[in-house]
Image (tube, rainbow, N blue to C red):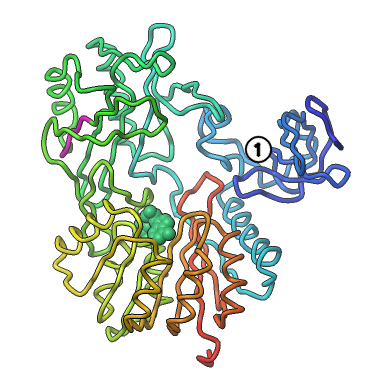
Amino acid sequence: MVVQQGQVIQLEVTGQAHDGAGVGKYEGFTIFVPLAVPGETVKVQIELVKKNYARGKLLEILAAHPDRTEPTCPIYEECGGCQVQHLSYEAQLTYKRQQVIDHFARIGGLDEVPIRPVLGMKEPWRYRNKAQVPFGRRQGKVVAGFYAPGTHQIIDMDSCLIQHETNDEAIAKVKALADELDIPIYDEAKHTGVLRHVMVRVGFQTGEMMIVLVTNGEALPRRDELVKRLVEAFPRLTSLIQNINPKRTNVILGKKNKVLWGKSVIHDTIGEVKFAISPHSFYQVNPSQTKVLYDQVLRYAALTGEETVIDAYCGIGTIALYLAKHAKQVYGVEIVSEAIRDAKANAKLNGIKHVHFEVGAAETVMPRWLSQGIQPDVIVVDPPRKGCDPVLLKTVAGMGPERLVYVSCNSSTLARDAKILQELGYHVQEVQPVDMFPQTGHVECCALFVRKDNNQ
Ligand code: SAH
């Protein structure tokens, strides 16, 4: 091995990894260094050595890059929830774009693709509509926050600067009440105690608010008092729910929800489309940038009202319903049955009748649709991080839509799939990255592919 654990080296940082960490080569060997900025010379202590790379801790910045900035959050370095707060927001957007360019060139072999500047937020803070925070007890005191990276040690947190203020307030209030009312806090190691997690969701457009108390079993001591105090504290509270999770597991929510007060769902809107959100529903966490992203999908789809559209990997049907007004017929497919149940309910809620949702793997359902003669003009795919299944890409090409809009939360698999699509007769015309997760290393992309014989 070129480096050993504990060794201190000097490193020129030349790039940025997908998690925001700086990357450099030491005698040809790849070293990842969280919190280091491309262009910097840093002193690093090697912490982890693997076959093809090592990870190190930033000890000292020997030459700081001008893009470096003082992180706004006081617990940024311990928390691990954000990865690029040490960069100015402008610089975050520049690096995210560069990452997409690099992936298209290196993985896709596509260096000519126009990658547009990232669409960022005017105010890149307080954008999250959902918080889920583990509760614990340290030295007799109730703590709630994030796990320190790679551990289950809770970093106590009063405020998270990327959360909506209401979420912060709700968590602080439950923490104070748990202390005051002496509600037993869950002990992960012993699997004893009651209160495990608190989840809060707020509808940015409607102001509606949901608090979910996740408990280790049905019992919730001082329940009535707790409910009364939370209802008093939050006039916008719409739904207060107990979620029961008696299992020894890292999965946050259990199967069963019990409404303690108010309704079982809250509502929010994206553009003109209304959504019902339950504790288990998947819903995009940055609602204002979700609208920016979906508007981009709409532009690339270039609908006139006459088209048949497929939304593959449709989740609760957000994109399908957003496009429905502009299309003749929309089909959505998604593997999680609860999500499809939500999608159907949301279609009903909005009085949208010309959408058809089906449960199943896109790579299984779409070949069947193809054999049934469904001929989409536009296909939208929005797969998870691992990208699209090759069978799905083949089916897409077999259906021959004029346009394919690919929404991706991982530009390396997007670039890989772009290469395959290129071979299948689809040309990637343009990529528009959107910053859905400011202060973190993630970048979302929306890419337009057009059929090559379409003369575009
Ligand atoms: N388009 C939605 C959700 C995108 S997230 C939105 O914008 O809100 C990706 C979705 O793909 C998840 O809901 C996941 O459950 C689903 N999924 C994962 N693998 C799948 C597969 N093979 N076929 C269909 N859906 C799948």
Residue 253 in picture, x, y percent from top left: 31, 34
Q: Quadrant of residue 305?
A: bottom left
Q: Quadrant of the N terminus?
A: top right
Residue at 58%, 71% (x, y): give it: 418
| Residue beneath the point at 70% across and 38% down | 33
The mark tally for this picture is 1
Based on the picture, tell me whether residue 241 belongs to the magenta stretch. Answer: yes
| Residue receiving disc 1 | 35
186 relative to 101, above or below: above
Magenta stretch secondary structure, dominant: strand
Does 339 sit above or below residue 354? above
**Ligand number 1: quarter of image:** bottom left
Image: magenta residue range: 238-242
Residue at 38% in and 83% down: 377
Does residue 16 lie above or below 156 as drawn? below
Name the foreground residue: 12 vs 65.
12
Residue 288 in sight from this viewpoint: no
Image height of 335 relative to 163, above or below: below
